[in-house]
Amino acid sequence: MNPNNLIKEYTNGEVTIVWQSGKCIHSTNCVKNNPDVFRPKEKPWITPEKSTTEKIISTVNKCPSGALSFYMNNKS
């Protein structure tokens, strides 16, 4: 696996954030818009359980590179 092109997923149970390292341009939009979830100095650096689904979606939609995306989890 190429460490420069990782794809990782993080979920709060309702929404899953998908991060693609190879697309990330480090604009810090995610950190500025939702610092409770996006904490680049911590591991894991994305902790979606610390925010609302609506705020997560809003933040992900502001990612200029497309490195962040999301999908809704099925409710069964």
Image (cartoon, helix red, strand yellow):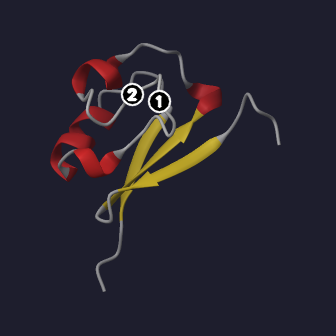
**Coordinates of residue 32 in the picture (x, y in percent):** 27, 18
**Coordinates of residue 31 in the picture (x, y in percent):** 33, 22
Q: Is residue 36 left or right of residue 19?
A: left
The residue sitting at 23% across, 24% down in the picture is 33
Q: Is residue 73 left or right of residue 20?
A: left
Question: On the image, numbered disc 2 is attached to which residue?
Answer: 39
Quadrant hosting residue 59? top left
Name the element at disc 2: loop
Local packing at callout 2 (Cα closer than 10 Å; few below 14, some 14-19, many 20+) is some
**Coordinates of residue 6 in the picture (x, y in percent):** 68, 39
**Coordinates of residue 36 in the picture (x, y in percent):** 26, 33
Local packing at callout 1 (Cα closer than 10 Å; few below 14, some 14-19, many 20+) is few
**Quadrant of the drawing holding the N terminus:** top right
Residue toward you, 44 or 29:
44
Question: On the image, numbered disc 1 is attached to which residue?
Answer: 42
Q: Where is 72 relative to 52, above or below? A: below
Q: Where is 9 relative to 55, above or below? A: below
The residue sitting at 21% across, 52% down in the picture is 53
Label count reads 2
Q: Amino acid at mark 2?
A: Arg
Q: Is residue 72 left or right of residue 20?
A: left
Q: Nearer the viewer, mark 1 or mark 2?
A: 1
Residue toward you, 41 or 67:
41
Residue toward you, 57 or 46:
46
Name the element at disc 1: loop
Q: Is residue 65 left or right of residue 23?
A: left
Q: Amino acid at mark 1?
A: Glu
Residue toward you, 33 or 65:
33
The residue sitting at 33% across, 65% down in the picture is 13
**Quadrant of the drawing holding the C terminus:** bottom left
